[in-house]
Amino acid sequence: MTEASQVHVKVSNGNDFDIGDRFDGIPYTFKARTTVAIPLEAAIHFFGFQVDPESQQLSFVPDSAHVCRRWGWNTPEFLKNDRGRKMAERITVTPVTYELREKPEDEDVTDLPAPRVSAPKAGEKAKATERA
C-alpha cells in the first residue's frame, strides 16, 4: 500500500459520569454518553487491549480487569455486585482508520479551516491572533 494511514479508535463512555485520564502528558476526558476519537497508543494505555492468540490481531475489547485497576474500580465497594466490571463494560472501543491522500490539482482549497493556534508555554498567557 502506497498511501499512509493513521489508526485511531472511537471510545464511547456509556456510563452516567465522565472519566478523565492522561497519556503522554495529554489529558483525555471521556464524557458520559458520548464518543470521542483518540490515538491507538492512548487507548492501549487506558484500556489494556490484548492480542488475540488465534488471529494475532489486536482485540478492541477493553480488558475489564485492567480498566478496573486503572480507575480504582477494584476496591471492595466496587467488587460488591460486580459494579466495577459492569462500569468497565459500558465503555466500547471501535477502530477508525484515516487515509492520507494527495490533493488533485484541480480541487478547490478555499474552504480550508483556520489553522490551529499552539497552546501557550507554561507560565504564558494565550495571545489573541488575527487572521488576514
Image: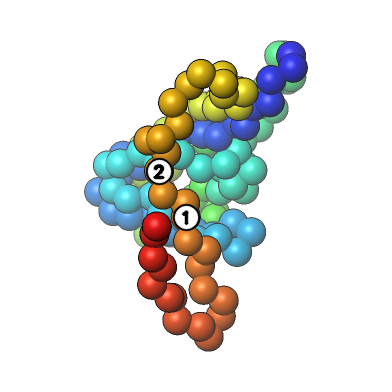
Numbered mark located on residue 16 in the image? none
Q: Is residue 50 left or right of residue 46?
A: right
Give the residue pinned by disc 1.
116
User: Label 2 sits on what residue type?
Assistant: Pro
Report helix, strand or loop for mark 2: loop
The image quadrant of residue 70 is: bottom right
Report helix, strand or loop for mark 1: loop
Asked if one can make out residue 82 in the rendered structure from this viewpoint, the answer is: no
Work out how far the residue at label 1 is from the one at label 2, CA to CA, in angstroms.
9 Å
User: Label 1 sits on what residue type?
Assistant: Arg
Q: Give the image location of residue 114, x and y in percent.
A: 41, 49
Asked if one can make out residue 1 in the rendered structure from this viewpoint, the answer is: yes
Q: Is residue 38 above or below residue 95?
A: below
The image quadrant of residue 108 is: top left
The image quadrant of residue 87 is: top left
- Quarter holding the C terminus is bottom left
In the rendered image, the residue lying farthest to the bottom is 123
Give the residue pinned by disc 2.
113
- Quarter holding the N terminus is top right
